[in-house]
Image (cartoon, grey):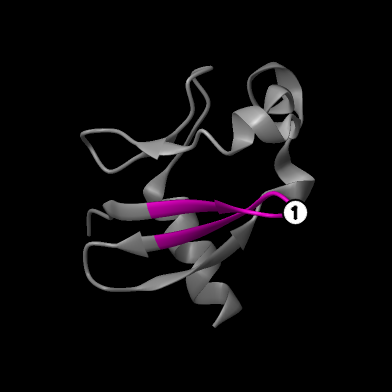
Amino acid sequence: MAYKVTYVEALCDYRLRVVFADGSSGVVSLKDRLFGPVFEPLRDPALFFLVTIDEFGVVCWPNGADLAPDALYKQIEKAA
C-alpha cells in the first residue's frame, strides 16, 4: 500500500500532526530523531516549522530532510 501525506503541521516540542490520504491521522514526535547532518539542523524551530509536503506526499523541509510516509504511518498505527 502506498501512503501519501495530505496535510502536515509542525507543533511545539518537535512534533508533527500528519493526515494521510486514507483519512488516518496522528501526531508523531521527532524529538529523539533529530541527529545527523540532515536532521540536526531541524533542531532550529525556525527551520522545523517550515515543514511541507512534496508532490509525492512526502514530508520534507527546505534543507533536504524528508520523512518516508510509510514510516510515519506505522509510527501512528503503533501509537494507537
Return the residue at label 1.
13
41 and 66: which one is in front?
A: 41
Residue 42, relative to residue 8: is it above or below?
above
Residue 76, relative to residue 8: is it above or below?
below
Residue 35, relative to residue 10: is it above or below?
above
Question: Residue furthest toward the bottom?
Answer: 80
Region of the chain picked out in magenta, as a range: 8-18
Quarter residue 7 falls in: bottom left
Mark 1: amino acid: Asp
The reply, left or right, for residue 31 in relation to residue 61 is right
Instruction: Name the secondary structure under disc 1.
Output: loop
Q: Position of residue 34 (x, y in %)?
A: 73, 36
Residue drawn where x is 69% and y is 49% of the image: 14
Q: Position of residue 75 (x, y in %)?
A: 54, 64
Task: Name the magenta segment's main secondary structure.
Answer: strand
> For the N terminus, which image quadrant?
bottom left
